[in-house]
């Protein structure tokens, strides 16, 4: 019987496994990198072992260090979580060889299915030969053979870019999974991503716990998932379940696993089998009323599953809350998570708490929010409202995008539920939510109230000119975010309150440093306001940035300057690139790695490279000058 379990992972999944262990009376051990020394999963474990370093390759991908940590801490079992070494057969063998219980499938089953190339061969599917790909084969997908989570994947639409994308996908896969093997397969445009959750014991029982739809994705990473997958024809759903069960039985599978498909034109295309617990497993747990981690431990101890699969009930939806800016190419964000508060009635899976820092080394996911309801419509409404009411102060997040996605007619009606959802709808979905002007008024009056409380002041017989405050919009970026800047003008009133002169039509009901009530068109609205010293102000769901009254000329940058869009590490510079080279608009110049993803930095226009400050291995902060491209002057037309 398992008494002490080490989780060979970090963040949200480690905290989730620890939660079940507490319920079962199993003590827990965490491992942590130097970057994670103060992380929530370390604080929640009964014991923790340091893995010196920060990069995944030095820490969470070092199976030898993790096995040594388990033995040193007196653990008798290891749970791999997902990502990192969760689908590494050699790591599973090392755990078993050390006399520890492995919470996962047999190493032989991992080898058969964890490599996507070998899994396809097992099912008679042959990947494309990269040396024989032609224009007729396009588009194709370059894909990592190991791991998951959208890393090491590149869509290729032009034959000339295949070699470059192959190299980029391989580098990203090696960084994320310790395995740079990639392959090429046909890319199915805008299909539905549907998967089947499996749970198998060592006595021949196989549960197929229904379907999940994970079609809403960005960069091949899932954003919103639900169970069961809505709108599937009964015959197709039965076929998916049957194929998944046959795949599990073919390799003698034991434990939790997922078989993934791409559904298009009424047909299912096998993608892969993930030989681990999936990130989106909470929706299945909510629908089937099970604890998959508890069942994983029971199966690893030799327990038998009941012969009948549990009956499903209702509908569950999960949204992944990321520290990223969807309006700026999904750029990951970092910084202090000042406040994180989720309303009651929502399942929260997270590796962060208020006061924690979101760094550059790992995935940008902050949390998963999951709800369950009797119907899909009820679950959609419940989750959208819960996200609206979630208070999250700190880096820019995708929260507004999640709310808009859940309320989009293509999603609510399952009209076009497919992986192309964000390609079609992103501009509309990243339009700033309404109310930015009122939020800015509330921010300005809260600041004025705070100053009045500190220094006194009020209405005077001799009216002075209006006070003016300007705030950048919801995105919080240097250009004010998707809703631009908001200028507020106000003055003290005779009654001790304030009069707002711009925007027009706003009456101040009450104003305090942390709460402001405003009336417009006969409707009173209340705003909770929290201001932070660096100039960020959170007003309800709005994130505003206070603008300085005067611009510091030192903050101006030369035209053509390429600034780091995020903190990260320069991993590559284009071959042979040097100062003085001519470059063309859109030409890749260098690659940054941030939060385990590679981000390409391209020339903003055609011209001459006049400065290059980036070098492989250099760590940069957001806004750091990477290079300068002096654009070409167009000659004036001759008269």
Image (cartoon, rainbow, N blue to C red):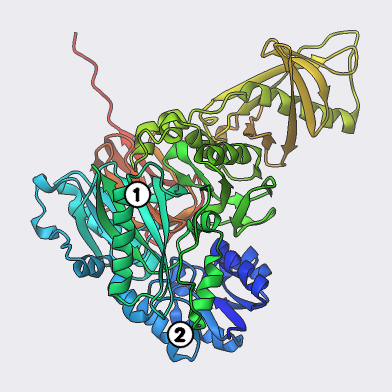
> Where, quadrant-wise, is the C terminus in this rendering?
top left
Q: Is residue 306 above or below residue 404?
A: below
**Image height of 507 relative to 191, above or below:** above
Q: CA distance from mark 2 to mark 1?
A: 33 Å
- Report the side of 21 relative to 568 (left or right): right
Name the side, left or right, on which 10 lies relative to 58.
right
Q: Residue at x 88, y 8 (%)?
A: 462
Q: Position of residue 247 (x, y in %)?
A: 29, 68
Residue underneath mark 1: 193
**Is 605 rendered above or below residue 86?**
above
Question: How many numbered circles does the render carry?
Answer: 2
Q: Residues within 10 Å of mark 1 (few under 14, many from 20)?
A: many
Task: Give me the residue at 52% from left, 37% from top.
Answer: 377
Secondary-structure class at tag 1: strand
Q: In this orientation, does residue 9 appear?
A: yes
In the rendered structure, which disc, 2 or 1, sits on the residue that comes first in sequence?
2
Q: Which mark is residue 95?
A: 2
Q: Nearer the viewer, residue 588 or 575?
A: 588
Q: Is residue 578 visible?
A: no
Q: Residue at point 41% right, 49% down?
A: 214
In contact (CB < 8 Å): disc 2 and disc 1: no
């Amino acid at each position: 019987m398992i008494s002490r379990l080490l989780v060979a992972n970090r963040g949200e999944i480690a905290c989730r496994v620890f939660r079940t262990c507490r319920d079962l009376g199993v003590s827990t051990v965490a491992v942590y990198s130097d970057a994670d020394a103060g992380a929530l999963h370390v604080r929640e474990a009964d014991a923790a072992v340091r893995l010196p370093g920060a990069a995944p390759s030095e820490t969470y991908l070092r199976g030898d260090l993790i096995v040594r940590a388990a033995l040193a801490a007196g653990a008798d079992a290891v749970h791999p979580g997902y990502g990192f070494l969760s689908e590494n057969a050699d790591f599973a063998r090392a755990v078993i060889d050390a006399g520890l219980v492995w919470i996962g499938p047999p190493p032989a089953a991992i080898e058969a299915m964890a490599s996507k190339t070998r899994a396809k061969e097992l099912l008679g599917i042959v990947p494309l030969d990269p040396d024989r790909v032609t224009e007729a084969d396009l588009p194709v997908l370059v894909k990592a053979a190991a791991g998951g989570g959208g890393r090491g994947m590149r869509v290729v639409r032009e034959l000339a870019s295949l070699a470059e994308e192959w190299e980029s996908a391989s580098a990203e896969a090696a960084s994320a999974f310790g395995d740079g093997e990639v392959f090429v397969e046909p890319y199915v445009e805008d299909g539905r991503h549907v998967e089947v959750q499996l749970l198998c014991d060592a006595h021949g029982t196989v549960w197929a716990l229904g379907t999940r739809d994970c079609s809403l994705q960005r960069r091949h990473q899932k954003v919103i998932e639900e169970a069961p997958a809505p709108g599937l024809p009964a015959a197709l759903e039965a076929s998916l379940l049957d194929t998944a069960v046959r795949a599990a039985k073919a390799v003698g599978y034991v434990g939790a696993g997922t078989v993934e498909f791409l559904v298009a034109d009424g047909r299912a295309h096998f993608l892969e089998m993930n030989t681990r617990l999936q990130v989106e497993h909470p929706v299945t747990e909510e629908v089937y009323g099970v604890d998959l981690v508890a069942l994983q431990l029971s199966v690893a101890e030799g327990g038998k599953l009941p012969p009948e699969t549990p009956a499903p009930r209702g509908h569950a939806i999960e949204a992944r809350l990321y520290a990223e800016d969807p309006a700026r190419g999904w750029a990951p964000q970092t910084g202090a998570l000042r406040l994180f508060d989720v309303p009651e009635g929502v399942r929260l899976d997270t590796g962060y708490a208020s006061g924690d820092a979101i760094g550059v080394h790992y995935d940008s996911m902050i949390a998963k929010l999951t709800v369950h309801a009797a119907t899909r419509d009820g679950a959609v409404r419940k989750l959208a409202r819960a996200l609206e009411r979630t208070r999250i102060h700190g880096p820019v997040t995708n929260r507004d995008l999640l709310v808009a996605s859940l309320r989009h007619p293509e999603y609510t009606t399952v009209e076009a539920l497919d992986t192309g959802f964000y390609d079609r709808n992103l501009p509309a979905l990243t339009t700033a939510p309404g109310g930015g002007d009122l939020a800015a008024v509330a921010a300005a009056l809260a600041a004025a109230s705070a100053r009045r409380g500190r220094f006194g002041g009020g209405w005077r017989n001799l009216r002075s000119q209006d006070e003016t405050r300007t705030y950048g919009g919801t995105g919080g970026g240097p250009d004010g975010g998707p809703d631009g800047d908001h200028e507020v003008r106000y003055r003290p009133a005779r009654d001790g309150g304030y009069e707002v002169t711009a925007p027009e039509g706003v009456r101040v009901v009450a104003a305090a440093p942390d709460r402001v009530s405003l009336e417009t068109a006969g409707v009173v609205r209340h705003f909770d306001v929290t201001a932070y010293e660096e100039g960020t102000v959170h007003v309800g769901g709005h994130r505003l940035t206070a603008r300085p009254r005067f611009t510091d000329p030192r903050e101006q940058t030369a035209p053509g300057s390429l600034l780091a869009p995020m903190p990260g590490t320069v991993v590559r510079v284009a071959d042979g690139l040097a100062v003085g080279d001519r470059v063309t608009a859109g030409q890749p110049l260098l690659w940054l790695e941030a939060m385990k993803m590679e981000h390409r930095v391209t020339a903003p226009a055609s011209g001459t490279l006049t400065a290059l400050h980036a070098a492989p291995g250099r760590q940069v902060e957001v806004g750091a000058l990477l290079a300068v491209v002096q654009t070409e002057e167009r000659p004036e037309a001759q008269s």
